[in-house]
Amino acid sequence: MVAEVLILHGWQNRRPDGHWQRWLAGELEATGAIVRYPQLPEPDEPVLDDWLRALDAELDGTDPDDLTVVAHSLGCLLWLAHAARRAERGEGAPLARRVVLVAPPAPDVVRGIPEIAAFEPTLDGATRDALTATAWERVTIVAGTEDPFCPEGAERTYAIPLDAEYVEVVDGGHLTIDDGYGPFPRVRDLVTR
């Protein structure tokens, strides 16, 4: 059984009923897991530093041996930014046992959207090392084919350069409610394996 899970939503997400993240929170709570599913500040016009502070607050008091982090879309880039800032400060201890990043948007797409451009990640060896240091286990990227927010594919854009495990969801799009992802057993199984 997974002991504690932190779920990080994306841009313009107000944690609606019907979203796979809300479904996942309910599924995990039913098993007795402690679930943290915060509403991040100003989801329509997010400020990176505000989201980083909110993430720090959520991580406070968690046990890296028992924590699983699941992020979607902009929440993935929040996790990458947090990892990079930790590395800059020389912090390298794992924050979680497992990290699952779902449908991260491509850097060039993020750069083209003024409201979220500050979240644009740099995907290089330093980012790979910083991300790897956040978890005891190998990080997993879950992404749909035909994702308009990552047109070249998350395997090529993220999984390969960041040395992450890759799970493809055929015809998954951006893995949102509009793409048909209310219940999402595949992510639940990755969290609880």
Image (cartoon, rainbow, N blue to C red):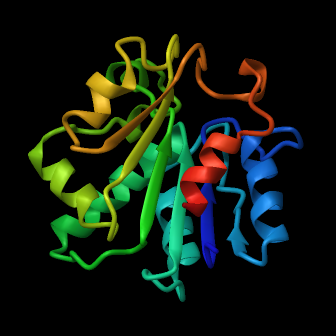
Q: In the rendered image of this protein, does residue 80 appear above or below residue 151? A: below
Q: Residue 37, position in %: x, y?
A: 70, 62
Question: How many numbered circles are shown?
Answer: 0
Identify the residue at image location x=84%, y=42%: 16
Residue ID at (69%, 35%): 12
Quadrant showing the N terminus: bottom right
Q: Residue 28: percent from the left, percent from the top? A: 75, 64
Point 79% across, 72% down: residue: 31
Left or right: residue 181 compared with residue 100: right
Instruction: Give left or right: position of 67 versus 175.
Output: left
Q: Is residue 29 left or right of residue 130?
A: right
**Foreground residue, 108 or 20?**
20
Q: Residue at x 52, y 62 (%)?
A: 69
Q: Residue 190: where, in percent of width, then height? A: 54, 52
Residue 57 occupies quadrant? bottom right
Q: Is residue 19 left or right of residue 43?
A: right
On-image quarter of the C terminus: bottom right
Residue 32 percent location from the top left of the image: 78, 78
Quadrant of residue 121 in the image? top left
Q: Residue furthest right?
A: 17
| Picture layout, residue 159 above or below residue 188 | above
- Nearer to the camera, 170 or 99: 170
